[in-house]
Amino acid sequence: MQVSGLLCNYTRESSCQLHVSYLAKVTRSRHNTGHMKTLLIATQNRHKTVEIAQLLATMAVRVVTLADVAPDLDIPETGETFAANAREKALAAACATGLTALADDSGLAVDTLQGQPGVYSRRFAPTDQERILKLLNLLAGVPWPRRTARFHCAVAIADPQGILTEFEETVLGHLTETARGDQGFGYDPIFQADGETRTMAEMTLTEKNAISHRGKAFRRAAAWVREHEAQLTA
Ligand code: IMP
């Protein structure tokens, strides 16, 4: 199934099917978890899911992912900004499932490349390895002071009626000349945050989350959810 547009622009039939199968799951789970509210994390990216699960671990809400409730939901990214894409994904997921949904959009902006790859970070080349190689080639010969870059993370939380809140965070750093480390994902092996001597791929998940764009944005989102739990749909 493909969902597009900002507001509940999906087929009635497919949405209903999703909604019904979701409700069955939540009804069962309410019975098991003492009426905990549910928050849907609208990502299909399994690396991000691992990071997000750790960041939201202390919340008193049941966290489900698209893999749990809407594995076939395909939400295209058509926005020109991280915030627009996060909004689009959160609204589409909330409309398709009837749940309060949290979505993020993230990427790397390189100063000497006028902010590229930016919202095209995932589409910059077919694989992580090729994306890294392409960037390293584009930056060949560029000295350290001009290798500045930043990771962005925009988070949006929506229910089927609309956007409830949004956050955006960044982490500043430099791009190294060679890839280092095997933790994390994406551009982590060539991103060294300011004040660090290791790339993000040389850090543990806990260390990365403590300083990362996603860590900062999701801590704000978790605080918001804790304060507004009563507003969650189910
Ligand atoms: P999206 O947010 O799923 O569109 O993915 C954005 C892309 O940006 C990812 O596929 C990665 O290539 C890159 N990216 C986003 N966050 C990170 C991060 O924390 N580390 C490394 N790369 C990232």
Image: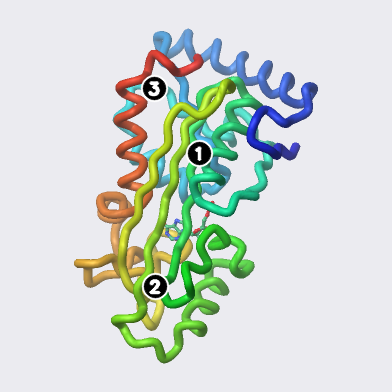
What is the C-alpha distance between the residues marked 1 and 2? 25 Å
- Percent x, y for residue 143? 34, 87
Looking at the image, residue 60 lies above or below residue 125: above
Picture disc at residue 153: none
The mark that comes first in sequence, 1 or 2, is 1
* Quadrant into which the N terminus falls: top right
Of discs 1 and 3, which sits in the foreground?
1
Q: Regarding mark 1 in the picture, which secondary structure is present there? A: strand
Looking at the image, residue 209 lies above or below residue 184: above
84 sits to left or right of 207: right
Q: Which residue is mark 3?
A: 61
- Percent x, y for residue 91? 58, 32
Q: Residues within 10 Å of mark 1 (few under 14, many from 20)?
A: many
- Percent x, y for residue 33? 41, 14
Could you say which quadrant of the image residue 6 lies in?
top right
**Dot 2 amino acid type:** Ile
Could you say which quadrant of the image residue 180 lies in?
bottom left
Q: Which residue is mark 1?
A: 103
Q: Residues within 10 Å of mark 3 (few under 14, many from 20)?
A: some
- Percent x, y for residue 65? 53, 34
Residue in front for this viewpoint, 29 or 10: 10
Q: Residues within 10 Å of mark 2 (few under 14, many from 20)?
A: many
Q: Is mark 3 within 8 Å of ligand 1?
A: no
What is the C-alpha distance between the residues marked 1 and 3? 16 Å
Colouring used for the render: rainbow
Of discs 1 and 2, which sits in the foreground?
1
118 sits to left or right of 192: right
**Dot 3 amino acid type:** Val
Q: Which residue is mark 2?
A: 190
Circles 1 and 3 in contact, beta carbons < 8 Å: no
